[in-house]
Image (cartoon, helix red, strand yellow):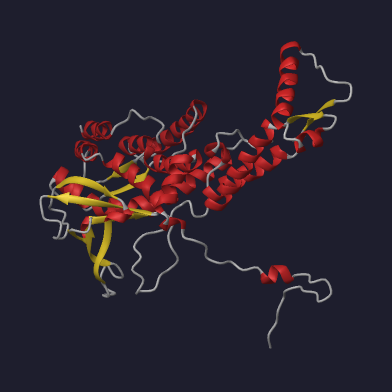
């Protein structure tokens, strides 16, 4: 037995149009590099979508925590990141990954690029590579137990340089649907794929609205025998007459016409255009997964404060950090630790710092609550002063507290 819950009518064709509607794959914007670069150059909205997310993903950076390392050792890792310009490189990589659908970072060390990347090697440079500079070489890895399963083991850069897959860190934009094993596509989709259609509609209605404004007032001249004059080839004389009439009006605010001629003004109404622009603007923001307050710089409408939209945006950025940035650090951190410390600590992890920043009043309230609660726990022996100081540092209530300060509390407590 086959059951259908769709509602249709033979008499009115009710439901037939929805039934005939189909989603079909349109041209792949991601593959059209020329169109993407034109969008980047011409559309400030496109630049805002790609750049703002990348900046927010790297703006507050990350907080490394390790019970095996002291403050001095953590500072060495931080200095090494600054020396390699890791933050700036990743921010730029995220921008191009968002625009083009993917980007590659080539890790150059003292060893040849055809050899595997190992934690004992020293990173000399991190080089950004566009998609068109990187191509898979050979066949896909078919060993299901290998970490590189379903991907290329070797790549060619600029068609000549052979690179081992471990030296190439690929950051993709929007993920593609699950692929078949034979599919050799290594790049994701541009983040603009979902925005492109609504963005064109928004640009179109904005342009048309601007054209309407320039024609909001139309002067109408009714001239005796106009059709006969045009037929007689007197267009220049007619245009000259109208020009002189408008010149007299603009200089003296007085209009002189023959008794047989007439003049009137017509103005266009714009009621409803603002609401239409707002709806298309909201559609663009929704497709870009960004609040209107951030994408367009508009304040929240109605009784909404916009805080909930900002919070949702921050959660979206955190999800992107986990999916796009964390795999990069997982590849680089063992090498960074070896370069900065000479060993890989067994106890090592990090979290991305929250984008949510408290106001002064919120910090004062939170600090009072924190002090009251932790004072009771210290008196009862549940927590130590060092644990409280470390928690206070991680909470962000005092930005000036460093890891060295926490370590100093531990040293003083021992004496």
Quadrant hosting residue 3: bottom right
- Which residue is drawn at the image coordinates 66% and 44% (left, top)? 279
Residue situated furthest front in the rendering: 232
User: Which one is nearer the viewer's eye here, 383 or 218?
Assistant: 218
Percent position of residue 33, x then y: 40, 52
Please state if 399 lies on the left or on the right of 262 as rendered. Answer: left
Q: Nearer the viewer, residue 96 or 339?
A: 96
- In terms of image quadrants, where is residue 251? top right
- The outermost residue toward the right is 259
Please tell me which residue is depicted at 59% across the width and 37% down the height of the picture: 306
Residue 395 picture location, percent across and down: 40, 37
Give x and y (percent) for residue 46.
48, 43
Does residue 97 appear to the left or right of 357 in the view shown? left
Q: Is residue 301 visible?
A: no
Position above or below: 76 against 126:
above
* Residue 14 falls left or right of residue 274: right
Q: Nearer the viewer, residue 20 or 222?
A: 222
Which residue in the rendered view is the most extreme toward the bottom? 1
Q: Is residue 46 visible?
A: yes
Q: Residue at x 45, y 66 (%)?
A: 177
Quadrant of the frame with the N terminus: bottom right
Residue 131: % across, % down? 32, 55
The quarter of the image holding the C terminus is top left
């Amino acid at each position: 037995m086959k059951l259908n819950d769709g509602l249709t009518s033979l008499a009115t064709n009710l439901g037939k149009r929805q039934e005939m509607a189909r989603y079909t794959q349109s041209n792949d914007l991601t593959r059209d590099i020329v169109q993407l670069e034109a969008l980047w150059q011409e559309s400030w909205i496109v630049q805002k979508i790609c750049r703002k997310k990348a900046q927010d993903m790297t703006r507050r950076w990350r907080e490394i925590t390790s019970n095996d390392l002291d403050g001095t050792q953590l500072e060495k890792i931080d200095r090494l990141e600054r020396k390699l310009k890791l933050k700036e490189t990743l921010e730029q990589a995220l921008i191009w990954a968002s625009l083009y659908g993917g980007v590659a970072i080539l890790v150059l060390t003292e060893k040849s690029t055809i050899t595997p990347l190992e934690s004992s090697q020293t990173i000399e440079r991190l080089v950004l590579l566009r998609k068109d500079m990187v191509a898979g070489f050979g066949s896909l890895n078919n060993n299901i137990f290998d970490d590189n399963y379903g991907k290329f083991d070797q790549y060619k850069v600029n068609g000549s340089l052979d690179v081992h897959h471990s030296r190439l860190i690929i950051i993709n934009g929007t993920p593609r649907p699950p692929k078949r094993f034979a599919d050799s596509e290594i790049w994701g989709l541009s983040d603009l794929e979902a925005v492109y259609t609504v963005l064109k509609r928004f640009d179109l209605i904005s342009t048309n609205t601007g054209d309407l404004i320039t024609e909001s007032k139309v002067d109408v001249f009714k001239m005796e025998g106009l059709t006969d004059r045009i037929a007689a080839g007197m267009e220049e004389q007619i245009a000259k007459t109208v020009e002189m009439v408008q010149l007299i009006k603009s200089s003296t605010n007085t209009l002189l016409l023959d008794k047989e001629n007439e003049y009137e003004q017509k103005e266009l109404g714009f009621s409803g255009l603002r609401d239409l622009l707002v709806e298309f603007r909201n559609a663009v923001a929704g497709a870009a997964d960004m609040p209107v307050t951030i994408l367009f710089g508009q304040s929240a409408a109605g009784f909404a404060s916009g805080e909930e939209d900002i919070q949702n945006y921050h959660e979206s950025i955190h999800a992107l950090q986990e999916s796009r940035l964390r795999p990069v650090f997982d590849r680089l951190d063992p090498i960074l630790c070896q370069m900065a410390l000479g060993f890989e600590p067994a106890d090592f992890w990090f979290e991305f710092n929250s984008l949510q920043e408290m106001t002064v009043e919120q910090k004062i309230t939170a600090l009072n609550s924190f002090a009251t609660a932790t004072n009771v726990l210290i008196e009862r022996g549940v927590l130590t002063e060092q644990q409280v100081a470390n928690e206070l540092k991680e909470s962000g209530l005092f930005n000036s507290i460093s890891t060295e300060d926490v370590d100093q509390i531990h040293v003083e407590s021992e004496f």
